[in-house]
Amino acid sequence: MTVSKILIANRGEIALRVMRAAREMGIPSVVVYSEADRASLPVRLADDAVCIGPGPSSKSYLSVPNIISAALITGCDAVHPGYGFLSEDRYFAEICREYNLTFIGPSVDAIARVANKADARRFMEEAGLPVLPGTPQVTSLEEAEAAARRIGYPIILKAAAGGGGRGMHVARDELDLQRGFHLARAEARASFDSDEVYIERYLDRCRHIEVQVLGDTFGNVIHLAERECSIQRRHQKLIEEAPGSTIDADLRRRLGEAAVRGAKALGYTSAGTLEFLADDDGNFYFMEMNTRIQVEHGITELVTGVDIVKEQIQVASGHPLSVRQEDVVVRGHAIECRINAEAGPDFRPATGTVGELVLPGGPGVRVDTHLYQGYTLPPHYDSLLAKIMVYGRDRDEAIDRMHRALEETVITGVPTTIPYMRGVMVDEVFRAGNVHTDFVESAGRTAVEEVVSAALAAST
Ligand code: MV4
């Protein structure tokens, strides 16, 4: 059971992140890479690296036979999937087990129970967590209309096999629903190979609050408090904070208790995140659960001091969690800005070769990135270039620090979202902490756009 060599089945900054945790624990690791990532930093820094196929993910990072083969030929006894790719694929977790490879993540059963978002809702409702009024799968427009009349508009149609906001359609009246129902099912079928959709009451002005949990094989389950992730664009997170700017001690306790209760009901092990929606009156509702480490895990590490990847490896090795719930203390405030290779106000994905690269530093700054000067971005993968994280004694210091860090950062040769992020840091709505899920589409955007266009004008 003790993990002695880890295959890192991922790329980019998360491959480096896992490699660093393993190295600090004295555990050798092997990174896989596609031909398009041959010159990547993880390959350069790895103890060992195996090419698993050509650039397209389907032929490399999603190729189970190639990844399993890479693990076996290099003598690995464990696999860390990172996030995205195969990280929440129960069949991959199962095949790892069949080849006596420890999957550094939750059990196949836990992954399977919450992979379908409609099933996850029902499971958590039965475990006693609050959920929004809603339905299991709806299979006809008539069924959807009857449910919407019972729930009350506005409602949202969600793809059960989706997640992260993909395949969501809001209906504010019956006409919207008649237009959106078949479109939602067609999109779900096209995107997720399943046309299963379910309905929830839609909360217009709410906050996206997620709770980090950790479990081990001795039945211990703890939470590491919450992260606020309301600043999203087309359901891609842009800026995350820990702890939540409006979460008081009582709501933090109730959120944590709910998350631990849900994770315990699953017999959850390793790292996971339960996502909730919170309104301004202290109510919250379970939305979905992520059974992987997340992009934004680092800000939780900054405010709790817990190394979440090391905990995953420890638990996979059959050891108990190194921290008890009573030891978890949230100190200060952390913010993460996702720096993506995206251009202009419509954030369209971009590529290029990194020219000048100056990364921020100084007190309370952490940068997780795989960039180096001269690096050419491959076109096959997501646009994440770097995560700039800051830690401050309080939210104001964290915001000022993030603004300073963004000002210091120079990445030439590829357009980035840095100008947008600088705009948010000076936006009054954001600084007041009054951020809801409508931030990007609301007045906040106007203020940000003015700053962004000024910054873009200055940078050209
Ligand atoms: C919602 C919601 C309001 N009501 N569900 C977005 C991503 C995925 N985790 C689920 N998400 C949401 N689900 C109900 N019933 C609001 C969000 C949401 C959101 C919606 C629109 C624009 C930005 C958003 C940011 C975070 C969450």
Image: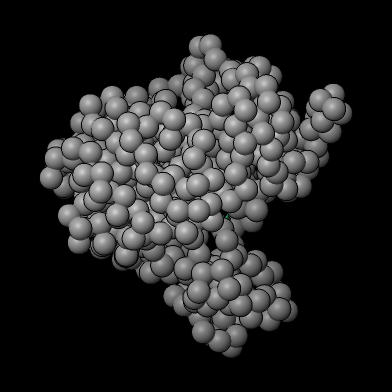
Q: Please, is residue 296 above or below residue 405 in the view?
A: below
- Using residue 422 as the reference point, say whether residue 333 is left or right of it: left
User: In front here: 207 or 68?
Assistant: 68
Q: Please, is residue 292 above or below residue 448 in the view?
A: below
- Residue 398: image quadrant is top right
Tell me residue 180's x, y (percent). 67, 75
Tell me residue 213's x, y (percent). 32, 43
- Residue 335: image quadrant is top right
User: In front here: 345 or 55?
Assistant: 55
Q: Is residue 215 visible?
A: no
User: In front here: 261 or 412?
Assistant: 412
Q: Which residue: 73% across, 48% down?
A: 348
- Using residue 403 as the reference point, say whether residue 49 is left or right of it: left
Q: Which residue: 51% across, 19% down?
A: 365
Q: Which residue: 58% across, 88% down?
A: 142
Tell me residue 2's x, y (percent). 14, 40
- Residue 436: image quadrant is top right
Query: Which image quarter has ligand 1?
Result: bottom right
Locate the N terminus by quadrant. top left
Tell me residue 406's x, y (percent). 65, 23
